[in-house]
Image: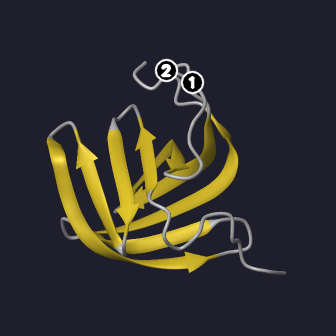
């Protein structure tokens, strides 16, 4: 089985979730993790790997291991009228967070500013 190639190496990936709110931007070998308590976010180096059904990233944010899984599939954040092309699962320390994602080449459907 071939590794997932649905997101090119140079694409910038944006991920978001709510309850609790969080955001992640992945570009050029780094991840910027943001929350309402840290709007500007923390930028850390990450490792990218392709699995059978999506991409994975791993690194460390504020001393906690972060693992990110991005998989293709229609996703709605529940807060806007947007539909995203990817789902995101984040493990940060002992917490698991769910969200949606898009890239600079594979955008969401719906309003730009909901």
Which of label 2 and label 1 is nearer to you?
1
Answer above or below: position of 13 versus 28: above
Estimate how packed mark 2 is, as few (under 14), some (14 to 19) or many (20 or more) residues with alpha carbons within 10 Å: few
Horizontal arrangement in the rendering, residue 47 relative to residue 35 (left or right) = right
Can the viewer see residue 15? yes
Kindly report the distance in space between the C-alpha atoms of the residues bearing marks 2 and 1.
8 Å
Q: Position of residue 90 (x, y in %)?
A: 46, 56
Answer above or below: position of 76 versus 30: above
* Mark number, residue 110: 1
Which image quadrant: the C terminus?
top left
Is label 2 in contact with label 1 (beta carbons under 8 Å)?
Answer: yes
Q: Position of residue 14 (x, y in %)?
A: 43, 50
Snapshot colouring: secondary structure
* Mark number, residue 80: 2
What residue appears at the point 33 percent right and 35 percent down from the top-left corner? 21
Dot 2 lies on which element? loop
Can the viewer see residue 94? no
What residue appears at the point 40 percent right and 22 percent down from the top-left corner? 113
What residue appears at the point 74 percent right and 73 percent down from the top-left corner? 52
Answer above or below: position of 37 versus 88: above
Horizontal arrangement in the rendering, residue 78 relative to residue 83 (left or right) = left
What residue appears at the point 42 percent right and 42 percent down from the top-left corner? 16
Tell me the quarter of the picture where residue 85 sits.
Answer: top right
Q: Nearer the viewer, residue 20 or 10?
A: 10
Tell me the quarter of the picture where residue 32 sits.
Answer: bottom left
Q: Position of residue 57 (x, y in %)?
A: 47, 71
Dot 1 lies on which element? loop
Q: Nearer the viewer, residue 97 or 31?
A: 31
Tell me the quarter of the picture where residue 1 sits.
Answer: bottom right
Q: Earlier in the sequence, mark 2 or mark 1?
A: 2
Q: Nearer the viewer, residue 11 or 1?
A: 11
């Amino acid at each position: 089985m071939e590794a997932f190639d649905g997101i090119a190496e140079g694409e910038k990936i944006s991920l978001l979730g709510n309850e609790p709110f969080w955001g992640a931007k992945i570009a050029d070998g780094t991840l910027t993790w943001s929350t309402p308590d840290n709007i500007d976010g923390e930028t850390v180096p990450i490792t990218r790997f392709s699995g059978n059904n999506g991409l994975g990233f791993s690194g460390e944010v504020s001393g906690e291991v972060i693992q990110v899984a991005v998989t293709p599939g229609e996703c709605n954040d529940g807060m806007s009228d947007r539909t995203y092309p990817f789902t995101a699962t984040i493990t940060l320390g002992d917490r698991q967070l769910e969200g949606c994602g898009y890239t600079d080449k594979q955008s969401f459907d719906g309003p730009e500013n909901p």
